[in-house]
Image (cartoon, rainbow, N blue to C red):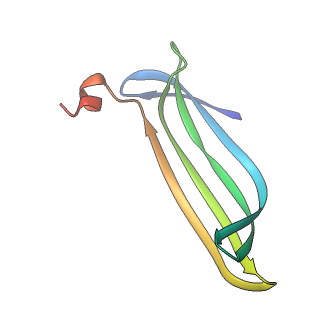
Amino acid sequence: LEFRGLTAVDEVPCALIAFDSGDASYHMFMTPAPNMEIEVVGRSHYQGELSLELESGWVRKGYLTEMVVSEVTAGGQSLVTSTTERTLEIRLLTEEQFAGR
């Protein structure tokens, strides 16, 4: 976590915090169908920023970008290599916004 400074979101004072997971790896063995075993090896890396309300500590706004790289093999042969990038947005909703009013 890295403190980036102060900001305001919807006129509410917030601390701007950056985060970066670094690389994380995974290795899974799965049986998606009878008599079919696959192996998935990959890595994931995510980073983003959060605006935290100074008074309450609640997340007022934020985003997370994740990059996932995977290779699926079966019987020692590569079946699929994939790269997925996704961005998630986080924002604090009022009760009215949540209820769709």
Quarter of the figure with the C terminus: top left
Q: Is residue 66 left or right of residue 76?
A: left
Q: Nearer the viewer, residue 8 or 82?
A: 82
- The picture places residue 23, in percent across and down from the top left corner, at 77, 55
Q: Is residue 79 left or right of residue 29?
A: left
The residue positioned farthest toward the bottom in the image shown: 77
Q: Nearer the viewer, residue 24 or 36?
A: 36
The residue positioned farthest toward the top in the image shown: 55
- The picture places residue 80, in percent across and down from the top left corner, at 65, 81
**Which residue is depicted at the point 58% across and 40% down?**
49
Q: Nearer the viewer, residue 47 or 34?
A: 34
Quarter of the image where one finds residue 75: bottom right
- The picture places residue 55, in percent across and down from the top left corner, at 51, 12
- The picture places residue 18, in percent across and down from the top left corner, at 64, 39
**Which residue is depicted at the point 65% across and 52% down?**
46
The residue positioned farthest toward the left in the image shown: 101
**Which residue is depicted at the point 53% across and 26% down?**
52
The residue positioned farthest toward the front in the image shown: 34
Q: Is residue 33 left or right of residue 60?
A: right
The image shows a total of numbered marks equal to 0
Quarter of the figure with the N terminus: top right
**Which residue is depicted at the point 69% across and 77% down?**
36
